């Protein structure tokens, strides 16, 4: 654990970086991930940061993540818990997290441990150089199985067929980092998995500068993937719907 006892207080201060950590049903392992994130951020000299821990859940759920996150946040003012009654899936969680973040740079990070905190630091350093408005990763090495790799291949292929002007690899890969100025130009509305595509599509139409860097995607550590056949149908349905919406809009002009 890195010694960060001399840390500056975040009160009345805009953090350099807000990391929106998607903690949905992450359970006990979220404790270690949060500590690893803090160690990586402190160790790499990010001056001030906050971790926005999004642990929204459905009514009636017995999952303990929200309780774990609240307990963590009591002990550290850099941790901002977001614990609400869920009204949507991943996209809704992302939007709630972004809304609650105060930082000059906003990073969306998955809380299930498939991406190492060091990847966030690499992406932040690239964004800080100033040539990009958004920096995202693409999964150059994947350890989450052949089926998931195939699904991503088909999804990304279809995405580029429908939206050839978006020059970005691996649309759903996170972390994704945005400058606050870039974020404030976006009008995000997706409640589900489409949020990643929505960010990239809007970024392209706003001519935002997109930087990419390779990352390694770890295995699921024994848990079942949340991605099902239904998720894939939803992904593809969303893409086609969005394509027709923008097509109709461009014909009206
Ligand atoms: N499945 C699911 N994930 C959610 C939801 N809301 C937020 N998330 C977050 O979305 C992030 C990405 O979801 P994942 O299911 O890990 O996506 P993935 O890595 O492509 O797929 P698997 O890990 O194979 O399930 C996770 O970190 C979750 O915390 C939700 O309603 N359902
Ligand atoms: Mg995952």
Image: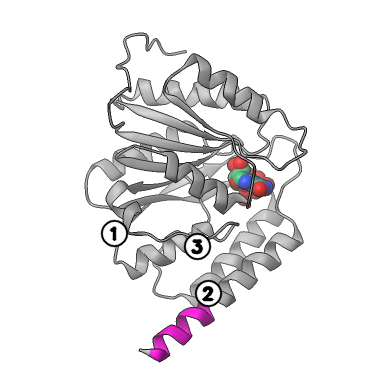
10 Å neighbourhood of mark 2: few (<14), some, or many (≥20)? some
Q: Does the magenta portion include 216? A: no
Q: Which residue is mark 1?
A: 209
Q: Which residue is mark 3?
A: 197
10 Å neighbourhood of mark 3: few (<14), some, or many (≥20)? many
Whole-percent x, y for residue 61 in the image: 76, 37
Whole-percent x, y for residue 50 in the image: 40, 29
Query: Magenta: predominant secondary structure element?
Result: helix
Q: Which residue is mark 2?
A: 242
- In front of the other: 204 or 241: 241
Q: How is the image coloured?
A: one colour
Asked if residue 245 is positioned above or below residue 191 in the image, the reply reads below
Query: Mark 2 to mark 3: distance in Å?
Result: 10 Å
Quarter the C terminus occupies: bottom left
Look at the numbered discs 3 and 1 and tell me whether their residues touch, using CB distance below 8 Å.
no
- Disc with the residue nearer the chain's start (2 vs 1): 1
For the magenta stretch, what is the residue range?
A: 243-252
Look at the numbered discs 2 and 3 and tell me whether their residues touch, using CB distance below 8 Å.
yes
């Amino acid at each position: 654990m890195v010694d960060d006892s001399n840390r500056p207080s975040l009160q009345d201060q805009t953090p350099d970086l807000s990391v929106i950590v998607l903690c949905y049903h992450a359970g006990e392992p979220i404790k270690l991930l949060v500590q690893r994130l803090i160690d990586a951020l402190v160790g790499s000299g990010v001056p001030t940061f906050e971790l926005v821990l999004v642990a929204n859940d459905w009514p009636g759920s017995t999952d303990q993540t929200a309780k774990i996150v609240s307990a963590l946040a009591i002990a550290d003012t850099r941790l901002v818990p977001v614990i609400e009654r869920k009204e949507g899936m991943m996209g809704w969680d992302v939007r709630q997290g972004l809304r609650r973040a105060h930082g000059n740079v906003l990073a969306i990070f998955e809380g299930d441990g498939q991406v190492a905190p060091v990847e966030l630091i690499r992406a932040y350093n690239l964004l800080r150089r100033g040539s990009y408005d958004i920096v995202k990763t693409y999964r150059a090495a994947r350890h989450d199985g052949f089926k998931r790799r195939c699904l991503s291949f088909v999804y990304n292929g279809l995405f580029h067929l429908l939206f050839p002007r978006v020059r970005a690899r691996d649309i759903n890969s996170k972390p994704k980092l945005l400058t606050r100025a870039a974020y404030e130009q976006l009008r995000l509305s997706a409640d589900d998995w489409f949020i990643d595509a929505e960010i990239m599509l809007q970024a392209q139409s706003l001519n935002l500068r997109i930087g990419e860097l390779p990352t390694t995607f770890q295995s699921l550590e024994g848990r079942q993937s949340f991605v099902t056949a239904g998720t894939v149908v939803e992904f593809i349905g969303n893409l086609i719907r969005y394509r027709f919406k923008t097509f109709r809009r461009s014909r009206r002009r």
